[in-house]
Image (spheres, rainbow, N blue to C red):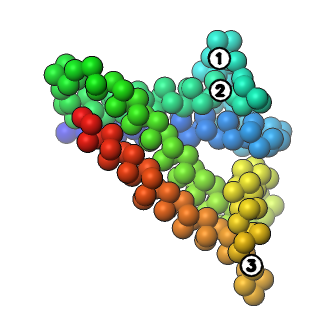
Amino acid sequence: MIEAALKFLIQTLGNLFVIAVLLRFMMQLFRVPFRNPFAQFIVALTDFAIKPLRRVVPGLFGLDLACLLLAFVVEFAVVVASYWLDGFPFALAGGRVWPVMLGLGAVRLLSLTVYLIIGLTLVRAVLSWVNSNNPLMPVVYELSEPFLRPLRRVVPMVAQIDLTPLVLFILCQLVLMVPILALERALLGAL
């Protein structure tokens, strides 16, 4: 009972922090203005870990590799902690367990990124219907637009309704169901 509650707590807090770090990475990647209160919240939430890491991990081609490394390390720690709390016999599994755990951390990070894209698109759609003047809207718009813009070239509007968020949801679900699930099953089969 305590193990399940602790596992839930570790997964929830770890994944929320990874989402914040991924949001920071995406905001830098897509050049989102950081003068927004939401962007400032994300920066303030992640600065304690990213600033020291940047001294060691340089950026590459404008990508903040410190953010990606931090997100991966935290997700790896969440995966290892979850298996440890489930009673996985790390000592008996031998040396092959750590590459599998690293792979699971990477796959779960990809999965979390796809869920983040779904969430951003959903928030954007809801805010566009309810309150487009919300201070969150510029950040959500800038983060979701690079995924929606290519689809608008292919998906026509129907009766002045933009169906690209729906198409993006379907594509993201397919990515989660086929390649990501296949990778996860392959890695779990290696244990």
Q: Residues within 10 Å of mark 3 (few under 14, many from 20)?
A: few
Under circle 1, the secondary element is loop
Q: Which residue is mark 3?
A: 156
Which of the 4 image quarters holds residue 90? top left
Residue 64 image position (x, y, % from top left): 70, 28
Q: Are marks 1 and 2 in contact (CB under 8 Å)?
A: yes
Under circle 2, the secondary element is helix
Residue shown at 71% from the left, 66% from the top: 151
| Mark 2 vs mark 3, CA separation in Å | 37 Å
**18, 38: nearer the viewer:** 18
Residue shown at 56% from the left, 40% from the top: 19
| Mark 1 vs mark 2, CA separation in Å | 7 Å
* Three-letter residue code for mark 2: Leu
Answer with mark 2 or mark 3, whichever residue precedes in sequence: 2
**188, 79: nearer the viewer:** 188
* Three-letter residue code for mark 1: Val
Q: Residues within 10 Å of mark 2 (few under 14, many from 20)?
A: some
Answer with mark 1 or mark 2, whichever residue precedes in sequence: 1
Q: Which residue is mark 1?
A: 57
Residue 38 image position (x, y, % from top left): 72, 43
| Mark 3 vs mark 1, CA separation in Å | 43 Å
User: Compared to 74, does 155 lie above or below?
Assistant: below
Residue 127 seen from this side? no
Horizontal arrangement in the rendering, residue 116 relative to residue 159 (left or right): left
Residue shown at 28% from the left, 25% from the top: 96
User: Compared to 102, does 165 lie above or below?
Assistant: below
Q: Which residue is mark 2?
A: 65
Residue 168 image position (x, y, % from top left): 61, 64
User: Compared to 161, does 149 lie above or below?
Assistant: above
